[in-house]
Image (cartoon, rainbow, N blue to C red):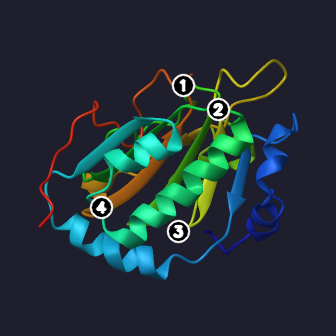
């Protein structure tokens, strides 16, 4: 994250997942270290294209992702379980994808209720300062940290979180991004892979 004049602003962003229910909160960032998952992600970045997607109950979705490296699979299962508990949803949509393009580079808000995004490798998702969609200043969710982002369908009197995917192609980088959604998900952003399984794991 930016450590300059916005440090105090960044510290004000809630860390507890349950804070997302508060009307004034459009974004939660949970700091964490994911060294083991980060190491495992390196092998996935060598597979082009790489994408895995799954849907159903948490246990059903995890079964569909069983060929992933164990460290990443365990992390996804933990996050998906917590996300399902938080949202009260018995159906999740999970996508893990390598991103090398400039897709979703425009600041936007998703047509969903709540979305979880974490980046295992490469630059993290960027969000608008003061949640202003026209803001010139964008701040980063650090690699490994968990972002909970409100969408347009969260509820009345709840502003969605304005964010974007950093332009990986322009930056010449690869990203490995995990996105978890509820059933209300209606827009393919960040790591959409159209339900396809691409990239063969050795």
Q: CA distance from mark 2 to mark 4?
A: 24 Å
Looking at the rendered structure, the secondary structure element under dot 2 is loop
Q: Which residue is mark 2?
A: 89
Q: CA distance from mark 4 to mark 3?
A: 17 Å
Indicate which disc, 3 or 2, sits on the residue closer to the N terminus: 2
Few, some or many residues within 10 Å of mark 4 (<14, 14–19, 20+): some
Sort mark 1 into few (<14), some (14-19) or many (20+) by Cα contacts within 10 Å.
some
Residue located 51% across and 56% down the image: 77
Q: Nearer the viewer, residue 1 or 56?
A: 56
Pointer 2 and pointer 1: residues touching (CB < 8 Å)?
A: yes
**Front tag of 2 and 1:** 2
User: Between 85 and 140, which is closer to the camera in this rendering?
Assistant: 85
Question: What is the spatial separation of the Cα atoms under label 1 and label 4, in whole angstroms?
Answer: 23 Å
Can you tell which quarter of the image residue 69 is in? bottom left
Instruction: Using residue 110 as the reference point, say whether residue 120 is left or right of it.
Output: left
Disc on the earlier residue, 2 or 1: 2
Marks 3 and 2 sit apart, C-alpha to C-alpha, by 24 Å
Q: Secondary structure at mark 3?
A: loop
* CA separation in Å, label 2 and label 1: 8 Å
SS for dot 4: loop
Quadrant that contains the C terminus? bottom left
Are dots 4 and 3 in contact, CB under 8 Å?
no
- Please give the residue where the numbered disc 3 appears in the rendered image: 144
Q: Which residue is mark 4?
A: 68
Whether residue 101 appears in this view of the structure is no
Question: Which residue corresponds to mark 1?
Answer: 183
Q: Quadrant of the N terminus?
A: bottom right
Vertical placement of residue 89 versus 83, above or below: above
Q: CA distance from mark 1 to mark 3?
A: 24 Å
């Amino acid at each position: 994250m930016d450590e300059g004049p916005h440090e105090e602003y960044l510290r004000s962003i809630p860390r507890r997942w349950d804070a997302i229910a508060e009307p004034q909160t459009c974004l939660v960032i949970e700091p964490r270290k994911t060294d083991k998952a980060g190491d495992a992600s390196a092998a996935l970045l060598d597979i082009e294209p790489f994408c895995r997607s799954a849907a159903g109950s948490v246990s059903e979705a995890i079964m569909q992702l069983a060929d992933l490296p164990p460290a990443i699979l365990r992390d996804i299962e933990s996050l998906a379980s917590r996300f399902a508990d938080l949202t009260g949803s018995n159906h999740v949509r999970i996508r893990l994808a390598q991103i090398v393009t400039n897709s979703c580079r425009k600041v936007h808000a998703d047509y969903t209720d709540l979305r979880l995004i974490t980046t295992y490798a490469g630059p993290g998702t960027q969000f608008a300062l003061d949640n202003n969609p026209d803001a010139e200043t964008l701040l980063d969710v650090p690699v490994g940290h968990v972002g909970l982002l409100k969408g347009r369908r969260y509820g009345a009197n709840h502003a969605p979180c304005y964010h974007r995917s950093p332009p990986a192609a322009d930056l010449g980088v690869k990203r490995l991004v995990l996105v978890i959604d509820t059933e209300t998900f209606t827009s393919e952003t960040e790591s959409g892979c159209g339900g396809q399984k691409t990239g063969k794991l050795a």
